[in-house]
Structure formats: structure tokens, C-alpha cells
């Protein structure tokens, strides 16, 4: 199983109401450090092995947004689903997978 790597900045455009009651747009930037990751087995019985989904969660203007990064077969970025909760994602991270080094516990 690989780990998700993010680089760059994600930018969301959100509507805000100014003092005069007019709608303006504000850009909110999210850094890779603002995203918390969890990994789940999406389908353990696929033809080429287990399919994993890496779920990245962040909060933008009080709204939860998620990146669902599907890894299938193992080590290959298969699909990215962006769940923006109605917010406009004007620029996304550069998203990839990197392998975590396996530790050989016999050396310890």
C-alpha cells in the first residue's frame, strides 16, 4: 500500500456577504498540512488485488471537503473523487502516490 503525496496549494472560492449585503468571492487556500488522511480497504477481492481508498479531509469556511484517492492495483493511482460540499475548487493540489519503505523487523 502506498501513501498519498500532496504538493502545491488547493484554492477554494467561497461566497461571502459584505457589509452592504452584496455577494463577494473570497479565495481560501489549503496547504497539504491542513489535510488529514485515513486509509480504508475499498474492495479486498478485486481481480488484481486489494483496492484501497485514501480519504483526505479538510475544512474550508466551516465545510468539510474530502479527497478520495483510489489505489488499484496496489501502488497505482486509479481515480480521484473530490467531494467539495458545494464549494468551488478553483485549483487543486498535485496528487500522487509514493511508496512507504517497508521495515525489516529482523534487524531489530
Image (cartoon, helix red, strand yellow):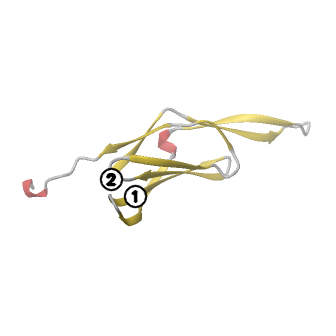
Residue 106 is situated, as x and y percent measured from the top left of the image, at 8, 57
Q: Residue visible at 52% across and 44% down?
A: 34
x and y percent of residue 90 in the render? 64, 35
Task: Point out the image quarter for the C terminus.
Answer: bottom left
| Placement of 24 over or under 54, stated as above or below | above
Q: Of residues 55 and 70, which is closer to you in this image?
A: 70
Q: Is residue 83 above or below residue 89?
A: below
Quarter where residue 22 is shown? top right
Q: Secondary structure at mark 1?
A: strand
Residues packed near mark 1 inside 10 Å, few (<14), some (14 to 19) or many (20 plus)? many
Position of 61 compared to 4: left or right?
Answer: right
Q: In which image quadrant can residue 7 be found?
A: top left
Query: Given the current orientation, which residue lies at the most extreme left position?
Result: 107
Quarter in which the N terminus is drawn = bottom left
User: In the shown orientation, is residue 24 left or right of residue 5?
Assistant: right
Furthest-front residue in this view? 47
Q: Is residue 41 left or right of residue 1?
A: right
User: Compared to 71, does 28 lie above or below?
Assistant: above
Label 2 environment density (alpha carbons within 10 Å; few <14, some 14–19, many ≥20): some
**Residue under the image location 90 percent in, 40 percent down:** 21
- Location of residue 81 in the rendering, given as x and y in whole percent from the top left corner: 55, 50
- Residue denoted by label 1: 52
Which residue is at a point 8% across and 53% down the rendered structure image?
107
Q: Position of residue 70 (x, y in %)?
A: 44, 52
Q: Earlier in the sequence, mark 1 or mark 2?
A: 1
At 53% from the left edge and 34% from the top edge, which residue is drawn?
A: 9
Q: Which mark is residue 6?
A: none
For numbered disc 2, what is the local secondary structure? loop
Q: Which residue is mark 2?
A: 74
Circles 1, 2 touching at the beta carbon (< 8 Å): yes
Which picture quadrant has residue 30? top right
Residue lying at the far bottom in this picture: please name it.
45
Amino acid at each position: 500500500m502506498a501513501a498519498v503525496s500532496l504538493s502545491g496549494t488547493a484554492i477554494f472560492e467561497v461566497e461571502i456577504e459584505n457589509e452592504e449585503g452584496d455577494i463577494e468571492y473570497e479565495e481560501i487556500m489549503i496547504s497539504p498540512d491542513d489535510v488529514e488522511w485515513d486509509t480504508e480497504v475499498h474492495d479486498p477481492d478485486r481481480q488484481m488485488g486489494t483496492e484501497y481508498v485514501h480519504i483526505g479531509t479538510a475544512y474550508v469556511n466551516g465545510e468539510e471537503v474530502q479527497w478520495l484517492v483510489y489505489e488499484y492495483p496496489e501502488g497505482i493511482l486509479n481515480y480521484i473523487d473530490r467531494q467539495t460540499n458545494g464549494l468551488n475548487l478553483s485549483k487543486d493540489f498535485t496528487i500522487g502516490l509514493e511508496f512507504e519503505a517497508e521495515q525489516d523487523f529482523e534487524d531489530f
